[in-house]
Image (cartoon, rainbow, N blue to C red):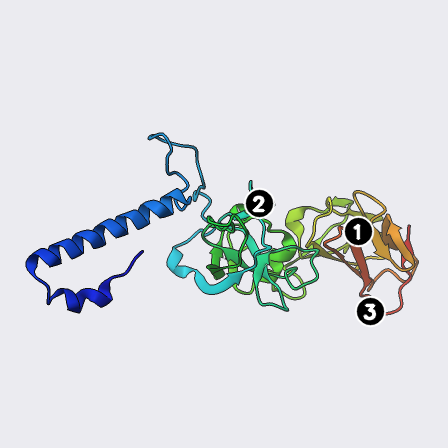
Amino acid sequence: MLQFDYLAPQVDQLSRRARRDFWRDRHNLARRDILARRWQGFYSGFGNVPGIGSTVETYEAAPTWARHSLLVWAPGMISSAAIDSGNTPTTTLRPGLVLGKITASALWTNYSPTATDGSQVAQGVLGIGLPMLDPFTNAVNAKQWGIIVGGPLQTGKLLGLDLQAQAAMSARFIFDTNTTGNGRFPAQNFVTKTANYQVLATDNLASFDNEGAAGPVTFTLPPILNGYSFNFRGRAAQNLIVASSEGANMEALNNLVANSVAFQTGSQIVGGEFQVFSTPDLKWIVRNLSAGTNTVTVA
C-alpha cells in the first residue's frame, strides 16, 4: 500500500481546497494500488462469478483435543522443499502435518522416517495451513510460520504420524490415544501368555512372558509398521518362539531374512529375553537381552 504519512505536516499548511484535493488524490492512488494487486493475482478469487465456490481448505481437522491455550507454539522457518504428500497440490501444507527439523539449516520440513538430514525425528506440528507457492512468482519459498511444539494432540488428525514419530514426540505432546506417553521403562505393561498369541498393534511397548505355560508358546508379531517395540521373556522351561506375520523380514544373527527366532534349547530358555522392534524400512530387528548365554534358534 502507498504511504503518504510523511507529507501530513506539509498538508496542514495548505488551503482547504488544496487539502481536499491532496486527500482525494491519495485515496485514488491507494485504491488503484489495491486493484493492481488484485490484477496480479493477489486475491485468487478476483474475477470469479459471485456465489459459493469450491472448498479451498478446511480447518475441521483441528489437531488438538483440548483448549488451544494449552498448546505450545514457537516461530520457525519452513523449508521451501516441505511438502504435504497427501494433498493436491503438495505445496499446500495442511493443518496437522507432522514436522521435523533439518539439522544443517535449522529449517522445518515435513517429517520423513527415512530421511537422513534430521527431519527423520518428529518435533512439531503445523497448526495452521500454509501454501508454499508465492502468489506473484508461482515459485515455492521458505516461509516463517507458527509451529506447535507441545500440548495435547489428536492422533487421528495428524498427517504423516507413525509410531516412531509418536514415541519421539511423547515427551512434549499428550496424545489422545496414549495419555500416559511412550517414555515408560522398561515397558508400559507386562503380559503373561500360556498359549499361542497374536500380538496386536495395541500391545506396543509391552513385555510378554510364558510363565505357567505347559507347552510351547508362539508369539506372532502384528503386520509390520514403523515404531513397534516388544519384549519376550522366558519364565517357563517351554519353547518360546517369536514369528513374523509376513515372513522373511526379521534381522537376527547372520540372517537378514529370518521368519522367526526362538529359545528352545533345554536349560537355556528360562532367563532368555528378546527385544523385537520395527524400523522405518519395515524390518524387525531382534536383540538378545538374555541374562546369560542363551542359544537363539533362527529360522
Which sits in the foreground, 249 or 221?
249
For badge 3, the amino acid type reads: Ala
For badge 1, the amino acid type reads: Ala
Q: Which residue is mark 3?
A: 291
Which sits in the foreground, 278 or 20?
20
Instruction: Please give the label number shown on residue 213.
Output: 1
Tell me the CA gap for discs 2 and 1. 53 Å
Q: Residue at 78%, 45% (x, y): give it.
A: 196
Vertical arrangement, residue 105 with respect to residue 110, above or below: below
Quadrant of residue 169 in the image?
Answer: bottom right
Instruction: Please give the label number shown on residue 174.
Output: none
Q: Is residue 185 left or right of residue 67?
A: right
Tell me the CA gap for discs 3 and 1. 20 Å
Q: Residues within 10 Å of mark 1 (few under 14, many from 20)?
A: some
Q: Tell me residue 227's x, y (percent).
A: 68, 54
Q: Tell me residue 178's x, y (percent).
A: 55, 54
Q: Of the residues tagged 2 and 1, which is closer to the observer?
A: 2
Q: Are marks 2 and 3 in contact (CB under 8 Å)?
A: no
Can the viewer see residue 288 in this picture? yes
Tell me the CA gap for discs 2 and 3. 50 Å
Q: Tell me residue 268's x, y (percent).
A: 89, 62
Q: Residue at 52%, 60% (x, y): give it.
A: 173
The secondary structure type at the circle numbered 1 is loop
The secondary structure type at the circle numbered 2 is loop
Vertical arrangement, residue 120 with respect to residue 217, above or below: below
Q: Residues within 10 Å of mark 3 (few under 14, many from 20)?
A: few
Q: Is residue 221 left or right of residue 117?
A: right
Q: Which residue is mark 2?
A: 90
Q: Is residue 169 left or right of residue 39?
A: right
Which comes sooner in the sequence, label 2 or label 1? 2
Q: Of the residues tagged 3 and 1, which is closer to the observer?
A: 3
